[in-house]
Amino acid sequence: MTMSVSYRHLLSIMLASSLAACAGGTEPQADLAPDPTTGTMPSHYQTTWELPAPSKAYVSAVLTPTAWLAIPGQDSAVIGNGGSFELSVPDGDSMMVTHGDAAPPGIEAAPAVTLTADESATIILFVPDGAVQEIDVAIGDWPAEPAWPDLTRHLAGTAVQNGDLYALTLDAAGPLDNQLLLATVHFSHETAGGTVSFFWQINPGAESLARQALAAFLDDLRTGRYSSAVDSYGGSYETLVDANTDVDPQDWSALLENACTINGFQCLRPMSIAPQSSSPDAYGFLVEFEEEDGALFTMGPCCGADETTPPQSEFTFTVVPDGAGRFLVQQLPPYLP
């Protein structure tokens, strides 16, 4: 069943009964106004879910929508990863702007969400100084390769609106196993409008979670989020400690920063991440990296190796579960002396 909610419909519809259930069976409060202490970015929806702020705005002139997926009983909603979107401007032209780094943009970095068969998730949208014109939500099998998925089913829901905030409570989707949830939002501003998609991975398996941890670790290193990279790294720091005698051996963030900026480790954008092997204790992946100019990164023979050895373009990474729900990467990116 296709769900298409117009902006005029959003203005006239009331909160769904499923939202009442989320509020403990009491009459729900339609308080969706932005938090005045944070300016335009809201901090709560119905004082029920924390809404984490996006890491960055992708367009300086027009801040595009932000989307969260909220699950009943959870304290914090999960911010969606955005894909490419089309932005129309007053002179009639349009431009494509890319969110995320994956191909297709955003899908590989989609955050993982656990959703039971009978839970009614809520998509919360923030459109600063703009209006939602139409929303479409669909699901499909998670793609094994970076490719647009085959969306097998559209989801129905009930929506409410207040100012810059929109909430769409989806009907329970039934059992979902490693599915992609895609929300496509058509929005408008006074001077521009566009279409943007948001992605979540629903009920992923362990190998998929391990792959996500590896992708996040490599992206954190590439973009300079070294403190975040520390949380995803479970390998040895011995080489970095030996190479950086002026750095506190326990300052792991500084050691990773030096690894990428001084010590010769190639903290590049991953071009592909392919599964190599898996077991309950470890997941192996082959990673190809992309040079700054978009070319495939290759590494020739080094340090006395046979000069006839072919260049290496695939690099092995191992990710292991820590027993507490996290997946930790065991290797650093390739090293060039």
Image: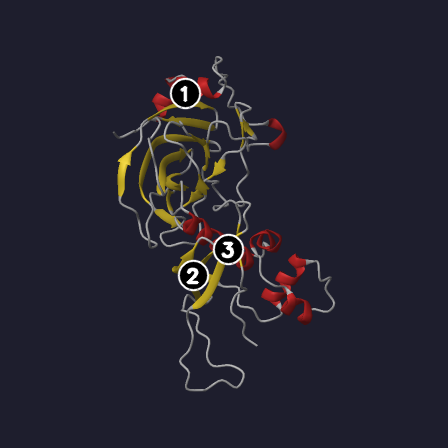
N-term mark: 2 or 1: 1
Is residue 12 rendered to the left or right of residue 246? left
Q: Which residue is mark 3?
A: 320
Structural distance between the alpha carbons of marks 2 and 1: 41 Å
Depth-wise, is mark 3 or mark 2 nearer the camera? 3
Image point (42%, 33%), residue name: 190
Q: Secondary structure at mark 1?
A: helix
Residue 231, image x, y percentages: 59, 51
Mark 3 packing: few (<14 Cα in 10 Å), some, or many (20+)? Answer: many
Residue 240 figure quarter: bottom right
Task: Say the numbered circle drawn on residue 82.
Answer: none
Q: Which residue is mark 2?
A: 285
Depth-wise, is mark 2 or mark 1 nearer the camera? 2
Q: Secondary structure at mark 3?
A: strand
Structural distance between the alpha carbons of marks 3 and 1: 38 Å
N-term mark: 3 or 2: 2
Image point (53%, 25%), residue name: 48
Q: Nearer the viewer, residue 194 or 148?
A: 148
Residue 319, image x, y percentages: 49, 57
Q: Nearer the viewer, residue 101 or 8?
A: 101
Q: Amino acid at mark 1?
A: Ser
N-term mark: 3 or 1: 1
Q: Secondary structure at mark 2?
A: strand
Is residue 16 rendered to the left or right of residue 47? left
Q: Which residue is mark 1?
A: 18
Q: Nearer the viewer, residue 68 or 75?
A: 75
Q: Amino acid at mark 3?
A: Val
* Residue 64 in the image: above or below residue 21: below
Residue at the far top: name it.
27
Mark 2 packing: few (<14 Cα in 10 Å), some, or many (20+)? Answer: many
Q: Nearer the viewer, residue 153 or 187?
A: 153
